[in-house]
Structure formats: C-alpha cells, structure tokens
Image: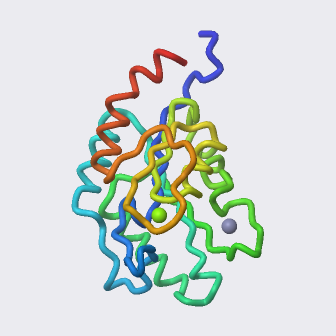
Amino acid sequence: MVSCARGLRPAVFLDRDGVIVIPHFQNGRSFAPRRLEDFRIYPDAAASLDRLKQRGFLLAVVTNQPDVGQGMILQSEVDAMHERLRRELPIDMLKACFHRQDENCDCRKPKPGMILAAAGELGVDLTKSFMVGDRNSDIEAGHAAGCTTVFIDLGYDEAPPDAPDHIVRSVAEATDVILGTTPTTQGAA
Ligand SMILES: [Mg+2]
Ligand SMILES: [Zn+2]
C-alpha cells in the first residue's frame, strides 16, 4: 500500500448551533441557547448522524462558545449541554472553543484549529472529510482544513460564505449530499 492515508478515516465535522442544535433567532440573527432548558436538538439530527456513522464516517462536533469567555453562561451549563449531545448523538468527539474573539486563540473558527486537533486525535483523512456549518466562519475553517464544505443556509441577515461546496437547508439535507457525493470525491482523489 503506497497511500500515506492508509488507516485514516473520513469524518464529518459538525458545527453545533444551527446544525444539530436549534438556535435562538432574533432580528435575523441566531444565538446559542444560554440555558439547559432551552437546549433543543434538531429532531432529524440523530437519524442523520446515524446514517453517516453507518457509512463509516467519524463524527466530530466543533463549536465556538464565546458566551463562556464573556461570562454570559457558566461553563458547567455548557458542559451539561454537551453531555446531552454525547448521550443522544453518536458523536466520536466534541471540541469547544470558549475564548472571546479578542483572545486570538488558535481554536476559534474561522481558524481550523479544532478540526485539525480532532483529525489528529481520531486519525482522519481531511481530504475525504466534510465540514457542515451555518455560518461563514464554519465554511472558512472547513476550507482551511482541506475539507469539503456544506453550508446550511438558515437565511440569516449576514454575509453568506463565499464559496461553500454545497448549500442545503438542514442537517438531513447535508447528510444526503455527503452520502451522495462521497464516492465521487473518493474517485477523484
Ligand atoms: Mg452555528
Ligand atoms: Zn479558542
């Protein structure tokens, strides 16, 4: 076997809010839920992730949660939310950035730090992997990591990403795109 990618697996990297968790909408913008009682997983998330898992994709959630660094939500509350995700969804890894933008960390999207770290820990072939997100920063991070990008367009009143590889409306549609295009992607690689 000459491939240097031997043993590495494809993954789907998923943003949290607006992808697997229902965001709070206000004035055309979306916000992370701040209370555990407001934390709701999209009804189609579990089945979608199960489908991806069955096709051999590793699943990693990568999420910016700056409200923690800004003191607007306790980290223990976010930890409880992420416990629920781990319990109810077949995810292999969850990485969260709790920094504020002005802290200029390496993990906050649009930087690819969380994707690259998860890929290293899980043994991921990034060229056969996907990043799914609802904001420009997700798509930029996915591009920077070398993944195929899938933009879930929820119609926010903000600039859409420049050049996502695919545009869909939900995590279920993102799953359809990923499962439909994977053989083509692998064949072209
Ligand atoms: Mg989001
Ligand atoms: Zn960070």
Q: Nearer the viewer, residue 33 or 56?
A: 33
- Residue ID at (61%, 46%): 121
Where residue 59 appears, as percent x and y from the top left, is: 44, 47
- In this picture, residue 30 sits left or right of residue 175: right
Residue positioned most to the top: 1
Assign the N terminus to one quadrant of the image: top right
Q: Nearer the viewer, residue 22 or 89?
A: 22
Where residue 39 appears, as percent x and y from the top left, is: 34, 77
Where residue 49 appears, as percent x and y from the top left, is: 32, 48
Residue 16, picture quadrant: bottom left
Q: Is residue 77 above or below residue 183?
A: below
Q: Is residue 185 above or below residue 24?
A: above
Q: Give the image quadrant in which the ligand numbered 2 is located.
A: bottom right
- Residue ID at (48%, 76%): 79
Where residue 87 appears, as percent x and y from the top left, is: 33, 64
Q: How is the image coloured?
A: rainbow
- Residue ID at (62%, 67%): 97
- Residue ID at (55%, 18%): 189
- In this picture, residue 104 sits left or right of residue 130: right
Q: Nearer the viewer, residue 110 or 166?
A: 166
